[in-house]
Image (cartoon, helix red, strand yellow):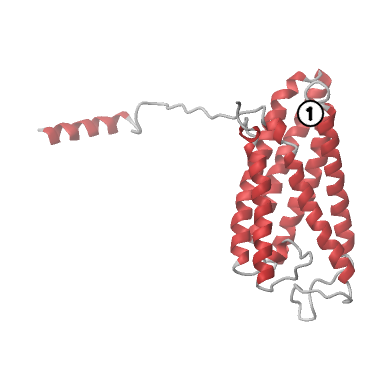
Amino acid sequence: MGPFWFTRGMAFLPVFLVIWTYLTFTISYIMSVSKGDVDPGFPYISDTGARRPESSVFGQMLNISAVVALTCLYIRYKQVDGYIEKLALDMQTRMNRLNKAGLVLAVLICLGISLVANFQETSVLGVHIVGAMMAFGLGTIYELMHCYITYKMFPDINGKSVFHARLVIACISLMALLGGFVATAFITSTDKNAVIKFHWKPGQPGYAAHLASTILEWILAASFLAYFFTFIRDFQKITIRTNTHLHQDNLYHDRGEILQNELADGASLA
């Protein structure tokens, strides 16, 4: 019997990322709801990790997600880069530029995830919002960009079904992102004392818009993670290794240091 599907190539990375990130959201949600810090009905994801001790758990686990996500996106970059030469000559330059632009977006996306993890909305709201926009906004652009790359790699490199899957997910992300922007325009997220509101009751001004905004945020996060699931079968067909090359037989910096060490050894033996 061959290896399990998730152990082939680098397929375990997107599997781990999705499971780990959902576990992050679940643990912080359970902790925050059980402590009464947020309402159980669709709080913002960030709200579930805004107060201690859940903020520490949320931040630590989400930092790990950011590192694994960057690893996955780098592997995707290397995989596309390896197949570009198989495309038509008139396509190679364009695909190469798009692939490199995608790598830059990948770094910014994962930096945004890290900012969300480390700067809670209750401490540094501005940085937290910037991080969320980098993660979700640039993430949606990345999805659309790689939909285009996947489309142009058909039929030489990949099938059309994976393109359709990625396109559907990217469209869901785009609609959730735009819908979330519209919904938040009708919300006042702070009370009269400029304190962030964690508890909402039906009938309050802006409650419907708040609920729509939170639901769309969860959909956006779920679609973003679903996009990584589409990498699983692709990652089964790639392995990345590192080669170690020692420049010399020891770690002495110069010949004089070696001679000095040999003289010291001779003196000790004498």
Quarter of the image with the N terminus in it: top right
- The x, y position of residue 101, in whole percent, is 75, 37
SS at mark 1 in the image: helix
Type of amino acid at the residue the image marks with label 1 = Met
- 155 relative to 181, above or below: above
Farthest front residue in view: 1
Q: Position of residue 209 (x, y in %)?
A: 88, 66
The picture quadrant where one finds residue 231 is top right
* Image location of residue 72, percent across then percent down: 66, 39
Above or below residue 205? Residue 226 is above
| Percent x, y of residue 160 | 85, 29
Nearer to the camera, 10 or 255: 10
Find the residue positioned furthest to the bottom: 193
The reply to whether residue 49 is in sight is: no
| Residue 126: quarter of image | bottom right
Above-or-below relation of 146 to 34: above
Is 94 drawn above or below residue 168 in the view shown? above
Residue 203 seen in this snapshot: yes
Taking the spot 89% from the left edge, 68% from the top edge, the residue there is 208
Q: How many marks?
A: 1
